[in-house]
Image: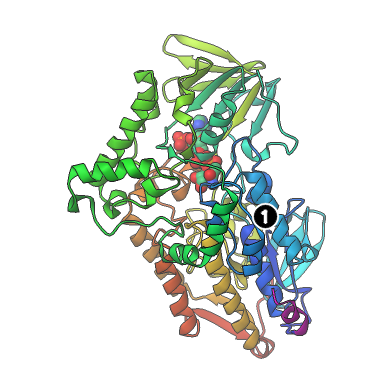
Amino acid sequence: MQSSQVESSEQSLSTGPDYDFVIIGSGVCGLYQLYRLLQLGVRVTALDLNGDVGGTWFRNRYPGCRFDSESYTYAYSFSEELLNEWDWTERFAPQGETLEYLRYVADKFQLRQHIQFNCKVEAAHFDAEQSMWRVRTQDGREITTRFLMTAMGLLSVPTTPRLPGLERFAGEAIHTFYWPSEGLDVKGKRVGVVGTGSTGVQVISTIAKDVGELTVFQRDPNWCAPLHNAPLAKDEMEEIRRNYDAIFEQCFRSPNGFIHRPLREVSTDVSREERLKLWEELYDQPGFGIWLGNYRDTMMDEEANAELSEFIAGKIRSRVQDPAVAEVLIPKDHGFGTKRVPLETKYYEVYNQPNVRLIDVNVEPITEVTETGVRITTPAGTEDIELDVLVFATGFDAVTGAFDRIDFVGDHGVRLREKWADGPTTYMGVQVTDFPNLLTCVGPQSGSVAANFPRGIEDIVAWMTDFCQYLIDHDIVRVEPTAEAEARWLDHVADINSKVLMSKTRSWFNGHNVNLDRDDRPRHMIYTGGAVRYRGILADEAAAGYPNFAMTSAKELTATPQATSV
Ligand code: NAP
């Protein structure tokens, strides 16, 4: 970091609010946005409800938590010095190492002094008269800021099923998100795990060898593929370091920000023999190649996807000894890769262990939690399963959950929670009409967040920082997108999303997992048009001088009387 830049610049938007910018969150995105805003020399603070930086990587301490992005693609690319100083020790780093990395970044660039920890934001109301946000924290403070930025994570509000009797359970019941930092001893115990998404798969594979008995409660199975993790030797790390430019370039050109990118060919360009040969190779390679580096029609065309799914189903059958159990583990409701693929390490082999039992809750639902475990309904009646520990790997109120948790009130008393009740609307995922000066770095419908996270957020933070510089240069004190632009963006997101098979499945990508009645209303949480296209759209907007945003300068604001704030 050129610290001189931070010290020398003394730009300020106003003497009115306490800050020019407040960022909510100091995870991967919030930290980098903070760093970039400090470089602009503005008055900025970040608020984080956790006791340290790291966001996702601070919270998720459950056994087996690790990347499914190649570690070296997860590093920030902005500082060569940082890249030279940091060694990753595994192809896919475990949670602890990533948290250490983010702590290292915060220390190296002296970011901590600009972050208020254990600071939970409860409400944020836009004061139209002063054109600023009034942010209320749980400890009763009010912080005012001209611009409010959100970097609250996509998956930061965990959801636990409302099972009758849960409060009666005498053992330990815990959502993976709240796994204690001191650990939880499961050795020799009777453990139940509800949920088989990426988190459940990691937990199950990791604890199965240590627990006494493991009962997995599965609703819809997921298609999983091998992670192929391995230690990174010193010389491999040196090689990676020499190639960082090329690695980042490769990620930059890929629609998802990973080193994997779809092939130019479609499945039918090659013979079945060739397809199977490639799939065998990809299945044996580390990471998401089998999902993201495949024939480009496999995620768009149902027939192509069905053939790939059958290939993966064959792999599951070959790895699980009991054919009946294998069938329960093979998804029937969606094709491979049309929901996020959990990457696993010997996950399917867990079901060959005598101490592991798989329960399909579609057939044998959990009817209640008892003092000593859970009661399921079976075709023969009911059965009590005794448990010492009940783990919920049941996912998150994703993408919009963190927004709902804060009482955001915009212009004319509009509540964000209400505006988004039937699904979010934004312009380019960066702003929302009626919510002037609210800048969403990590929010719905942003193309950055559907990518390998650090790669995606470097795009959006770069764009946001340029946008902020523009606002400063033009003395803008109020900015919001036009309603037309917001409506156009929603149409575009809906159109793009309709072309991918992912939009037809039920998962957090389209809000179905928290939609308890499991209805079919489309919610466009994520922009699936890819990082490359999204980056182009952002760049065009900036190059044209931000034509889709209505802006008011300080002078104009004082000349125009505003409506009274809420
Ligand atoms: P998730 O993908 O939403 O999975 C939640 C699981 O819980 C699903 O199997 C779901 O079943 C099940 N479930 C929810 N409510 C249930 C209920 N009432 N009864 C039974 N089962 C229930 O959540 P996640 O596994 O935490 O993963 C979320 C995202 O976090 C991932 O998609 C990924 O983006 C990220 N993640 C990444 C990594 C990594 O390796 N980097 C690791 C973990 C998570 P249904 O499918 O039937 O709803």
| 88 vs 457, nearest the viewer | 88
Give the residues drawn in magenta, as a range. Answer: 1-8
Which percent across, then down, holds residue 395? 55, 40
Quadrant of residue 182 within the rendered picture: top right
Evaluate whether residue 430 shows in this view. no
Judge from the rendering whether residue 333 lies leftward or rightward of residue 455; answer left or right. left
Which percent across, then down, holds residue 393? 57, 35
Q: Is residue 262 magenta?
A: no
Instruction: Identify the residue position indicated by label 1 in the image.
Output: 101
Tell me which residue sits at (44%, 28%) in the image: 348
Q: Main secondary structure of the magenta part?
A: helix
Q: Is residue 6 magenta?
A: yes
Which percent across, then down, holds residue 498? 33, 56
Residue 140 sits above or below residue 358 on the image: below
Quadrant of residue 340 within the rendered picture: top left
Tell me which residue sits at (66%, 48%) in the image: 97
Residue that extends furthest to the front in the rendered view of this protein: 235
Count of residue discs: 1
Tell me which residue sits at (54%, 29%) in the image: 204
